[in-house]
Amino acid sequence: MVSHARALLCGDPGVCAIQGDLRDPHGILGHPELRAQIDLREPVVILLTAVLHFIPDEDQPYPLVDVVKAAMAPGSVVVISHATTDDLSPDAVKQVQELYAQATAPAVPRSREEIARFFGGLELVRPGIVDAACWRAGPLPARPGRALLLGGMARKR
């Protein structure tokens, strides 16, 4: 994936693609290519979209995100989307668990409250943590159905 991204981006100024693992946030944040492109002393936007549900609790996802948040300058924003089973029936939850138990990267859906912990110490932007398909700053449109992916955005003061 990284070699493909590098091939696509080759020669574009201000762009780099690095290989990293969120379980090593210091390695990502300290990567020389990233540091050459991004000044973390200035506000940045960090996207943690559809990744945190692949980090199991034993890998300490909350402290990993805390490292990223600590590296952000005031005014920075973090965007998170995360799988949830809050709106699913117990039978559907069991089916999801069985499906992902066989995957090479098992998913760990988390509740809205567990997802909110990732935003700790930051100011959530309205509308807060909602169905990712409906997220937008301002009022939410009415959307029936079950949320499988919750999303939110928060700012560091």
Image (spheres, helix red, strand yellow):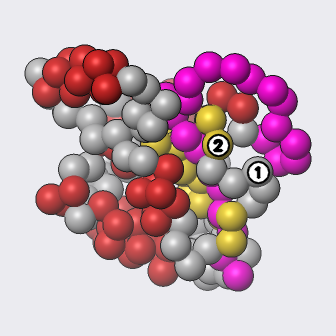
Q: Decide: marks 2, 1 in contact (CB < 8 A)?
A: yes
Q: Is residue 36 visible?
A: no
Quadrant in which residue 121 is drawn: bottom right
Picture coordinates of residue 97 (x, y %)? 22, 27
User: How many residues crowd around disc 2 within 10 Å: few (fewer than 14), some, or many (20 or more)?
Assistant: some
Q: Which residue is mark 1?
A: 127
**Picture disc at residue 26:** none
| Side of 51 relative to 126 (left or right) | left
| Side of 51 relative to 77 (left or right) | left
Q: Is residue 96 above or below residue 39?
A: above
Picture coordinates of residue 83 (x, y %)? 43, 36
Q: Residue 145 lies in magenta, yes or no?
A: yes
Could you give the CA–CA distance between mark 2 and mark 1, rounded to whole angstroms? Answer: 7 Å
Q: Which residue is mark 2?
A: 130
Q: Residue 75 lies in magenta, yes or no?
A: no
Q: Is residue 100 above or below residue 150?
A: above
The region drawn magenta spans: 136-157
Name the residue type under label 1. Answer: Pro
Q: Residue at x 69, y 54 (%)?
A: 128
Q: Residue at x 50, y 50 (%)?
A: 112
User: How many residues crowd around disc 1 within 10 Å: few (fewer than 14), some, or many (20 or more)?
Assistant: some
